[in-house]
Image (spheres, rainbow, N blue to C red):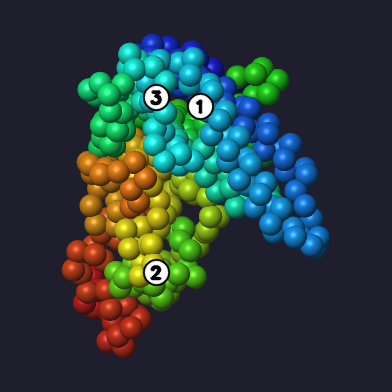
Amino acid sequence: MPGKALEDWLEEAGGSPAVRSTVLALARAAVSVSGEIHSAAQGVAPSDRKGAHADVRAEQKTLERYGNDCFLDEVRAAPVALFASGETEQPTLLDATAPLAVAVDSLDGSVNIDINMPIGTVFAILPVVGDAGQDGLPSLLQPGVNQVASGFFCYGPRLVLAITLGQGTHVFVYGSRVGAFLRSHVEVQIPRKTDEFAVDISNQRHWESAIRHYVDDCLHGSEGPHGRDFTMRWTESLVAEAYRILLRGGVFLYPSDSRRGYARGRLRLVYQANPIALLIEQAGGLATDGVNPILPQMPLSLHQSTPLVFGSSTEVNQVLRYHDGIDHAGIHSPLFSSRGLFRK
């Protein structure tokens, strides 16, 4: 039996008419972007051709611009006052009298296009505050708890939408034969415990000690303080990682580090971390910057970056404990090298 159509679910879920029409506009844009991605992927230059890397990067930038324009064009017809994205420095004013502001990361993980890995679009929908025509930034620089809806589209073998209106997280899959998003998962609940973690371990030497020791202890598996074996994942796509965690649990870590430009993390608070955090917490998980919850934080600028740790609640709390002063000497101290007594 096919699941409930997105349009019908939005009608029943209690969101305002403005939110419903905005989500449907974003969904139409995602269908167009998905088609363009699949068309572009067929024409990617082969890796052994001279200049292929430059050609692929140019293709990525073209698709990022296309995605941005596609979402912008669709929300013009929706009750949206302001549109912001990672592709533009300042928000675009659409209709100063409209009640909503939309912020998107139009093409997350675009480096994966040429290797046929999942990429996606992340979106946040916020209420307009003040006079959008005079200064739109206050409407976008709100804590994540103020989001009236958030979600992401994942472009892979299937086109998937994960969405929350603040009352649970639901997953929809696009059915090309019927031309609609059909619900596949109702009120997703992330498993509290996990044996999977996602992190780019090549940056380990740059991390602060709490994250480095946590990952070291995961890698030591059943011989380490966690007492169980872990599997490591990394796809270089926030959307792909979030989708996997929603469906089967896990913990995602993109910490700050000592490299230039990474001291405050790398993901964008307004249109990446906040919408993902709302989705994750509405599914029973947790989302933090490694120390503090993401959703209550007040953004100071549109493109402000943040560290991000999210996923299964028990494991995210474990990461917090490493920052919170528990002894995390791990393998770096012989006394504590293998499930030391003082680690419990």
Q: Which mark is residue 319?
A: none
Judge by depth and name the residue closer to the eye, 277 or 272: 272
- Label 3, label 1: how far apart the Cα atoms are: 11 Å
Judge by depth and name the residue closer to the eye, 44 or 253: 44
Which residue is identified by label 2?
259
Residue 205 makes an appearance in the image: yes
Residue 169 makes an appearance in the image: no
Residue 228 as seen in the image, left or right of residue 147: right
**Comparing marks 3 and 1, which lies closer to the viewer?**
3
SS category of the residue bearing label 3: strand
Q: Amino acid at mark 1?
A: Leu
Q: Position of residue 29 (x, y in %)?
A: 57, 26
Please, is residue 207 above or below residue 122 in the view? below
Q: Quadrant of residue 124?
A: top left
Q: Earlier in the sequence, mark 3 or mark 2?
A: 3
Q: Quadrant of residue 118?
A: top right
Q: Earlier in the sequence, mark 3 or mark 1?
A: 1
Please, is residue 240 above or below residue 219 in the view? above
Which residue is identified by label 3?
93
Q: Position of residue 198 (x, y in %)?
A: 46, 58
Say which residue appears at 51% left-offset and 37% top-offset: 106
Neighbour tally class for label 1: few under 14, some 14-19, many 20 plus, Cα within 10 Å: many
Q: Which mark is residue 72?
A: 1
Q: Position of residue 76 (x, y in %)?
A: 48, 19
Q: Amino acid at mark 3?
A: Leu
SS category of the residue bearing label 1: helix
Say which residue appears at 69% left-offset and 59% top-offset: 53
Residue 144 as seen in the image, left or right of residue 112: left
Q: Earlier in the sequence, mark 2 or mark 1?
A: 1
Judge by depth and name the residue closer to the eye, 302 or 341: 302
